[in-house]
Amino acid sequence: MTTVHRILESIRLPDDVNPAKLTPIVQVDASQLATLVAELFRAVKQQQAALEVIERETKKGKMEAEINTRNIRNEIESKLQMEAKKRIADDEKLRLEIKKEK
C-alpha cells in the first residue's frame, strides 16, 4: 500500500456516507490527457516556430530599411558634395573673370 492509499483509508467519513456510492467529481482518461498535452505541445512549438520566422523577417525588413536609408543618405551627401564643388568652381571662375576685367 502506498502512503496516499493509507491516508485515504484512514479518512473517517460521516456514518451516513457510503464510500462505495461516492462518484468522482472529475474523471480523467490518462491516454486522452497525454494526447491532449502532446497536441498542446505541438501547437506551442508551431507558434514558436511561426514567431521565430516573423522575428527573422522583421529583422530582415529592418536591415533592408536601414540599408536603403543609408544609401539614400549617401546619395544625397554625394550630390550635395558635387553641387558644392560645382559652386566653388563657378565662384572661382567668376573671381578670375572679375580680376581679368579690372
Image: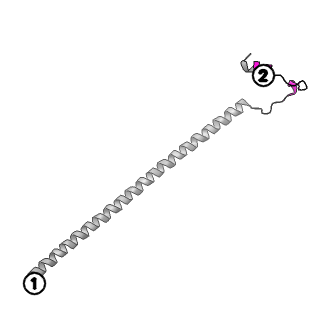
Q: In the rendered structure, which amino acid carries the disc numbered 1?
A: Glu
| 3 w.r.t. 56: above or below | above
51 to the left or right of 11: left
Residue 65 to residue 49: above or below: below
Q: Is residue 58 above or below residue 76?
A: above
Q: Residue at x 50, y 47 (%)?
A: 53
Find the distance from the CA under tag 2 to the CA under tag 1.
Answer: 118 Å
Q: Which residue is mark 1?
A: 101
**Which mark lies nearer to you, 2 or 1?**
2
Q: Secondary structure at mark 2?
A: helix
Q: Which residues are magenta?
A: 6-23
> For the view shown, which residue lies furthest in the bottom direction?
101
Q: Which residue is mark 2?
A: 8
Quadrant placement of the N terminus: top right
Q: Position of residue 32 (x, y in %)?
A: 71, 33
Sequence order check: which comes first, mark 2 or mark 1?
Answer: 2
